[in-house]
Amino acid sequence: MKRKIKVYLDTSVISAYFDKRNPERQFLTGLFFKRIEIFDTYVSEVVLAEIDDTRDVQLRGKIRGKVASLKILPIDEESRTLADEYIKQKAVPSD
């Protein structure tokens, strides 16, 4: 059996599915979600926390529904160390 490609989705990818301000991006994200079952798809506890911070209650519920079946990566010491290294190398901002 062929192994699925592992894909990590950050909050911006998931929210693009609902973002009508950029129709092309929304369309392309929709195409991805139509074929999501061919991937081994993950989100992290960080993504779930960012979703929970969504002010629009209806949108928050829709986004939560979209990620409900995805695997969740926990925040552990290894991920904290990697995040610290990204910040140290200025690959991502610290705030």
Image (spheres, rainbow, N blue to C red):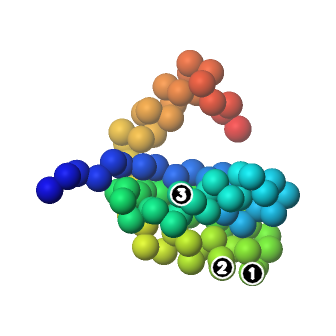
The alpha-carbon separation of the residues under discs 1 and 3 comes to 22 Å
Q: Amino acid at mark 1?
A: Gln
Q: Quadrant of residue 15?
A: bottom right
**Residue lying at 29% horizontally and 53% vertically, measured from the top left:** 4
- Quickly name the residue at label 1: 58
Q: Which class describes the residues within 10 Å of circle 1: few (<14), some (14-19), or many (20+)? A: few
Query: Disc 3 vs disc 2: which is toward the camera?
Result: 3
> Helix or strand or loop: what does disc 2 sit on?
helix
Q: Nearer the viewer, residue 34 or 60?
A: 34
The residue pinned by badge 3 equals 32
- Say which quadrant the N terminus sits in: bottom left
Q: Position of residue 80 (x, y in %)?
A: 45, 39
Give the vertical position of 15 relative to 60 (above or below). Answer: above
Residue 33, percent across and down? 53, 63
Residue sitting at 68 percent across and 31 percent down?
93
Residue at x 65% of width, y 77% of height: 62
Marks 3/2: CA distance? 20 Å
Of badges 1 and 3, the one in the foreground is: 3
C-alpha distance separating marks 2 and 1: 5 Å
